[in-house]
Image (spheres, grey):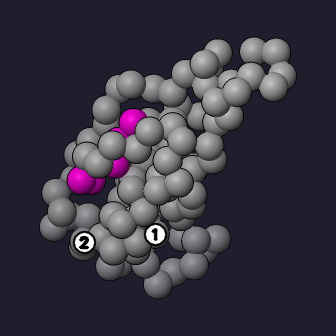
Amino acid sequence: MLELRPNCEVCDRDLPPYSTEACICSYECTYCRTCAENVLYNVCPNCGGELLPRPIRPKTERRAGVSLEKQPASTTRVHTKYSIKEIKEFTESVKDISPENR
């Protein structure tokens, strides 16, 4: 199950579980759409993978035990360990390689 991390790992913008502005990689690294597109060029600085819109977990329990209330989002804030300079160098080196070939 996805953690639904609460913030952008680059700019620390709040990304509540219902946000349509959250993007993730396959390891659940989480970024706001602005950072994903304009800073990271849709390249995860941690794994080099593709960044896609994060799914939204339903607020309302329509099936027993399946909802944001029953399976809450994470409250642990995560921050990248890389500097903006390191991120830019890395993303520049891989952004023109298609995600399936990275």
Q: From the viewer's perspective, is 61 left or right of 94?
A: right
Give the percent coordinates (x, y) of residue 24.
Answer: 51, 52
**Residue found at x 57% / y 58%:** 53
**Residue found at x 64% / y 30%:** 59
Residue 94 part of the magenta-drawn span: no
Q: Residue furthest bottom?
A: 96
- In the image, residue 66 sits, relative to residue 31, either above or below, namely above
Describe the element under mark 2 as helix, strand or loop: helix
Q: Tag 2 or tag 1, which sits nearer the N-term?
A: 1
Q: Which mark is residue 42?
A: 1
**Residue found at x 64% / y 15%:** 70
85 or 54, nearer to the observer: 54
Give the percent coordinates (x, y) of residue 42.
Answer: 46, 69
Q: Amino acid at mark 1?
A: Asn
- For disc 1, the neighbor class at 10 Å (few under 14, some 14 to 19, many from 20) is many
Q: Nearer the viewer, mark 1 or mark 2?
A: 1
Q: Amino acid at mark 2?
A: Lys
| Residue 91 visible in the shown view | no
Quadrant in which the N terminus appears? top right
Magenta-tinted stretch: 6-11
Q: Are marks 1 and 2 in contact (CB under 8 Å)?
A: no
Label 2 sits on residue: 88
Give the percent coordinates (x, y) of residue 31.
Answer: 39, 53
Give the mark count: 2
